[in-house]
Image (tube, helix red, strand yellow):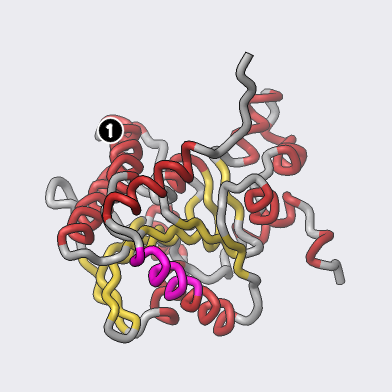
């Protein structure tokens, strides 16, 4: 059996994409004492690729925004295989605003191969919806914790990733593009996706070293992993509640402003 340290980036991609991997809803139901799903963007329709709602741990209320893949073929079709349409992001924005109004921390769960790239999605303003979601998150005056539980690819994932803290499960991936997309653009050959994955620095371990994420949660049994995530949520929210509204926004801004390396010539 391979040591965890020997698992390649491509193998992590395969683990993150495993259809038997636990979904956002399964984690939500395990972590929180209760969860009430709320629906609709109040503009077009309720897109089921993102679920939103209210949850509690003890007496602390949270707003939950989560990308949700299906278990069966029927459910995957209903949820568009976890690929959100613009109305999903506009629904998310609606509940971000509600969370700020009622001073509830926002917890996002990220698990998508990307936003839906269909013609209808583009006609409805997919790019604008993703950008607006990121903009809304960046300015929220409540704590925001983003958790990558599986496949976090492209703008579809980044739309829910602007948090004061970003946590990843150890076998999750997070990147601005899929390995297939990277290989197609760089080498005009999607079959080189395995090679691309090794270069993209998309594993939790790579991203922690680059200061893109803040914490890795080890994957043990589902029950223990959920319990560990719950502990991280409680810890993170308790620490972030010590900050004023303006400090929350500023710390989030500085977190993303300081990412990357550059040289002044």
Assign the C terminus to one quadrant of the image. Answer: top right
* Quarter of image, res 21: bottom right
Q: Is residue 192 magenta?
A: no
Q: Position of residue 219 (x, y in %)?
A: 64, 72
Q: Main secondary structure of the magenta part?
A: helix
Which stretch appears magenta? 232-242
Residue at point 33%, 51% (across, down): 247
Question: Along the horizontal axis of the image, is 45 left or right of 161?
Answer: left
Residue 78 appears in the figure: no
Q: How many marks?
A: 1
The x and y percentages for residue 14 are: 67, 56
Farthest residue toward the left? 42
Residue at the farthest top position: 265
Residue in the foreground of this view, choosing between 234 and 197: 234
Compared to residue 207, the image places residue 234 above or below, namely below
Viewer can see residue 253: yes
Disc 1 element? loop
Image quadrant where residue 131 sits: top left
Residue in the foreground of this view, choosing between 251 and 56: 251
Q: Which residue is most to the right?
A: 1
Residue 31 shown left or right of residue 127 in the figure: right
**Viewer-nearest residue: 216 or 252:** 252
The percent position of residue 149, horizontal first and vertical second, equals 53, 63
Tag 1 residue: 125
User: Residue 194 lies in what quarter of the image?
Assistant: top right
Residue under the point 51% across and 48% down: 113
Residue under the image location 40 percent in, 58 percent down: 67
Looking at the image, which residue is at 50% across and 72% down? 232
Assess disc 1: are there few (<14), some (14-19) or many (≥20) residues with their C-alpha within 10 Å of its C-alpha: some
């Amino acid at each position: 059996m391979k040591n965890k340290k020997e698992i390649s980036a491509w193998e992590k991609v395969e683990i993150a994409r495993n259809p038997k991997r636990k979904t956002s809803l399964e984690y939500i139901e395990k972590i929180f004492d209760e969860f009430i799903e709320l629906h609709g963007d109040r503009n077009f329709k309720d897109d089921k690729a993102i679920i939103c709602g209210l949850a509690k741990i003890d007496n602390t209320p949270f707003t939950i925004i989560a990308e949700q893949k299906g278990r069966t073929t029927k459910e995957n079709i209903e949820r568009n295989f976890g690929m959100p349409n613009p109305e999903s992001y506009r629904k998310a924005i609606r509940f971000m605003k509600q969370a700020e109004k009622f001073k509830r921390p926002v917890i996002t769960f990220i698990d998508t191969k990307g936003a839906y790239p269909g013609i209808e999605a583009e006609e409805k303003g997919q790019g604008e919806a993703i950008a607006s979601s990121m903009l809304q998150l960046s300015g929220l005056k409540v704590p925001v914790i983003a958790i990558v539980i599986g496949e976090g690819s492209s703008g579809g994932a980044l739309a829910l990733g602007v948090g004061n803290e970003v946590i990843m499960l150890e076998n999750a991936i997070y990147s601005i593009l899929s390995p297939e997309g990277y290989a197609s653009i760089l080498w005009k050959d999607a079959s080189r996706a395995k090679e691309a994955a090794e270069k993209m620095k998309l594993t939790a371990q790579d991203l922690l070293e680059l200061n893109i994420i803040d914490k890795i949660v080890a994957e043990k049994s589902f029950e223990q992993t959920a319990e560990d995530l719950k502990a991280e949520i409680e810890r993170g929210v308790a620490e972030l509640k010590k900050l004023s509204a303006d400090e929350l926004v500023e710390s989030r801004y500085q977190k993303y402003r300081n990412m990357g390396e550059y040289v002044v010539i």
